[in-house]
Image: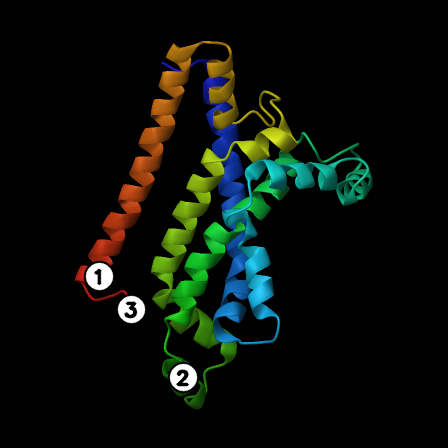
Amino acid sequence: MLSDGDWLALWVGVKLAVVTTLILLLVCTPLAWWLARRRLPGQALLEALLALPLVLPPSVLGFYLLIGLGPNGPGGWLAQWGGVRSLAFSFTGLVIGSLVYSLPFVLQPLKNAFAAIETRQLDMAAVSGARSMDRFFSLVIPQARHGYASAVILGIAHTLGEFGVVLMIGGSLAGETRVASVALYEHVEAGDYASAHRLAAVLLVASVLMLWALFRWQRKQQSTGVMP
C-alpha cells in the first residue's frame, strides 16, 4: 500500500492536472480555432513557439519559468499584488508552469479537430441565419469532440507525469508542490525501491487506463462513422 505522503502527492498531482487541463481547454479553444482557420504572416513562428515545450528540455523550460516566477521576475510583481513573496515553490506557480509545458498537448488535438471541419457546413448555417456563436457551439464543438477527448487525456496524463519542470519551480513541499513524480524520485534517491515500485505501478496503471479509454472511445467513434 502507498504511504499517506504518497497518497497526498498523488492528490496534489491530480488536482494540478485537472486545474491545468480545465484552464487550457478554455484558453486553447479560441486559440486553436483561430490557428486552424486563419493563415497570416508570422503564424508559423507563433505555432513553433507554442509547440516549443514538445522539444525543449524540461530543465531549460523549468529554469526560465523559475526565473520568471521568482521574486525578481514578472511573477514577483504578481505575487506582491496578491500579497505573497513569490509564485515559485507554490501551487499557483505550479499551475502557471503546467499551463506552459502542457499547452501543446491540449492545443494540437483541438487544432487538428477544428481543421477537419468542412467550411461548407458553417457557410450553409450562416446562410440559414445562424450566428457565429451558434454555429460554433451547435456544429463545431460536437464535431470536434474527439479532439476534446484527446486534449483532456493528453493534458492530464502529461501534467501528471512531468518531473523536471515541477521539481525546478515547485520543489517538494508536502501538500503544496510535492507531486507523485517528485515523490517517486525521492524514494529512488533514498534507496526505498519498494515504495518507488508501488508508486510507479500506480502511475503506470493510471496512464495505461487513460490511454486505453481514449483509444477505445476513438475506435468506437470510427466504427460508427461519427469521427470525420
Placement of the N terminus among the 4 image quadrants: top left
Residue corresponding to mark 3:
228
Residue 11 relative to residue 142: left or right: right
Question: Of the residues shown, which amino acid type is indicated by label 1?
Answer: Gln
Q: Residues within 10 Å of mark 2 (few under 14, many from 20)?
A: some
**Residue 160 x, y percent position in the rendering:** 46, 35
**Residue 186 x, y percent position in the rendering:** 52, 17
Q: State the residue at coordinates (62%, 25%).
A: 171
Residue corresponding to mark 2:
125
Question: Of the residues shown, which amino acid type is indicated by label 2?
Answer: Ala
Q: 37 or 83: nearer the eye?
A: 37
Question: Of the residues shown, which amino acid type is indicated by label 3?
Answer: Pro
Sequence order check: which comes first, mark 3 or mark 2?
Answer: 2
Q: Which mark is residue 222?
A: 1
Sequence order check: which comes first, mark 1 or mark 3?
Answer: 1
Q: State the residue at coordinates (42%, 49%).
A: 152
Q: Nearer the viewer, mark 3 or mark 2?
A: 3
Q: Are marks 3 and 2 in contact (CB under 8 Å)?
A: no
Q: State the residue at coordinates (66%, 31%).
A: 90
* Callout 3 secondary element: loop
What whole-number distance in Å separates the C-alpha atoms at marks 1 and 3? 8 Å
What whole-number distance in Å separates the C-alpha atoms at marks 2 and 1? 25 Å
* Callout 2 secondary element: helix
In the image, residue 221 above or below residue 138: above
Q: Residues within 10 Å of mark 1 (few under 14, many from 20)?
A: few
**Residue 50 x, y percent position in the rendering:** 57, 56
Based on the displayed image, in which of its 4 quarters is residue 73 positioned? top right
* Callout 1 secondary element: helix
